[in-house]
Amino acid sequence: MTTTAEIVKNNKDYTIASWSVQNAWNPIVMDRAEGVYFWDAEGKRYIDWSSQLVNVNVGHSHPHVIEAIRNQIGKMGYAQPSIATEARGQLGELLAEITPGKITKAFFTNGGTDAIETAIKIARMFTGKQKILTRYRSYHGATFGAASAGGDPRRHGHGPGVPDIVRLPDPYAYRSPVYNGRTQEEGDLIMADMVEEIVQMEDPKSCAAILIEGYSGTSGIIQPTEVYWNRLHQICQKYDMLLIVDEVMSGFGRTGEWFGVDNYPNVQPDIIATAKGITSGYVPLGATIVSEEIANYFNDHMFSMGLTYSAHPLAMAAGVANIEVYRSENLIENSRDMGKVLRRGLNDLAEKHQVIGDIRGTGLHQVIELVKNRETREALSGFQQPFTEPLQIVYKTLRDEGMSTFVRWNMIFNCPPLTITEAQLKEGLDIIDHALTKIDGYYEG
Ligand SMILES: Cc1ncc(COP(=O)(O)O)c(C=O)c1O
């Protein structure tokens, strides 16, 4: 039998880890997984507090999804994208049912990045304009177009990206000086007015779309209020721009709604790009889903995009089965309800640990920001810097005590599978409590 050390060695010797200096890669070996837990090769159990990459929304090893994939592969392993399949039509129809308003027709991709690439292409083809406006603190994927669209530092390190991406400042109420002495709504309105000014300076005749996460994700769950969203929507309408909403992470119940943008009922996207929870990661899949108007445009114009694995039958079957699970197990509602429990638990932790400076998010999509001082809000570890000592301690304690989650800069992400129970939430919050107890002494307020 291969030992844990040999498995790690093989992984490290022959494969490359994402977003890592390779010598620093110190992976857990996952052996099996079920529900909100997974086990390493030596039998140690971890609570999956980030649903892997915020995608295993229905939990691990869900029998209905496994069965659907099994049934599908028993009939065919692959069908090229110009062939129709039953599961493809079913998934398209289900997506039209659950997406907001006029969004009706899907192009299937391999994941979130190429769903974003497709959305940008569609916006350029449909409007005949080029510029795409995106936020600094955003992530939209890893290939050149999507990486250029994302504003956070993951776009750096490989030379110039694609042209005609215009960057927008962030509605970051906790840190942006615009919010000093103002309510979040007042600050949000100023930030949204700045978007209009930027459109005017860039020339509205060249601006194709605003691209924004339906609910901000790994850049720090930095989310404006409805005031901002409504204004953005108006700006798009006023200047004939499309509103592309990135629902790769915030889709499929993550925020207690089907899609993050559903938290803003007056906002109607023109294009939704999604992935992750569409199959909960069981098979890679993304989708770019467009309004009826855009879909109709391509009835007599060439749709210049294609992928060998577009609408892969296994992904289609996994997508249908996932939506069935979300519905039959009321997981969107559970995310909303458990999100409230999670928030109460995080609030309790903030009463106990002064290092918690801010808590943001909704549903099972929440983050805490750790600070040295609540007055100055100085971060306990720097943005895009290696972890300082207290963050190293947090990271190590969580892992030692059996929690797997994202810890980035000075933030701990709380995004477990949507199937999580109150007792399991308590278990996770207790682990975070232990980790924070170890770093209380680093508070300088
Ligand atoms: C908001 C958002 N958009 C796009 C992507 C890229 O998706 P993928 O990694 O599936 O290509 C991600 C991935 O984390 C994401 O969080």
Image (cartoon, helix red, strand yellow):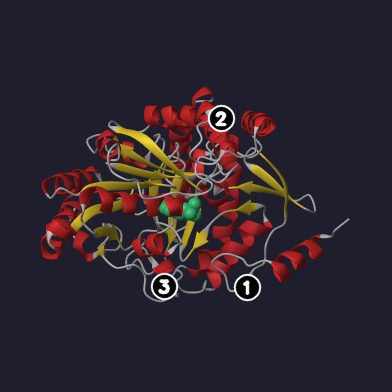
Local secondary structure at mark 2: helix
Disc 3 vs disc 1: Cβ atoms closer than 8 Å?
Answer: no
Residue 420 at least partly seen: no
Mark 1, residue position: 22
Q: Quadrant of residue 340?
A: top left
Label 1 or label 2, whichever lies nearer to me, is 2
- Position of the N terminus, as image quadrant, is bottom right
Q: Is residue 432 above or below residue 162?
A: above
- Badge 3 marks a residue whose secondary structure is loop
**Mark 2 in CB contact with mark 3 (< 8 angstroms):** no
Mark 1 residue type: Gln
Separation of disc 1 and disc 2 at Cα?
Answer: 36 Å
Residue 441 sits above or below residue 68 on the image? below
Near-viewer residue (58 or 75): 75
Measuring 30% from the left and 63% from the top, which residue is drawn there? 175
Image quarter (top left, top right, bottom left or bottom right) of the C terminus: bottom left
x then y, percent, for residue 344: 45, 41
Earlier sequence position, callout 2 versus callout 3 = 3
Hey, what amino acid is under mark 3? His
The amino acid marked with disc number 2 is Ala
Taking the image as shown, residue 236 lies to the left or right of residue 322, namely: left
Question: Circle 1 sits in a helix, a strand or a loop, which is it?
Answer: helix
Q: Which residue is mark 3?
A: 156
Is residue 68 at least partly visible in the picture?
Answer: yes
Task: Tell me which corner region of the image, top left, top right, bottom left or bottom right, holds residue 12.
Answer: bottom right
Q: Is residue 172 left or right of residue 384?
A: left
- In the picture of the structure, the residue carrying the numbered disc 2 is 321
Compute the Cα span from label 3 to label 1.
18 Å
Picture layout, residue 124 above or below residue 268 = below
Query: In terms of sequence position, does the residue under pointer 3 or pointer 1 come before the other?
Result: 1
Seen at 29% across and 58% down, the residue is: 134
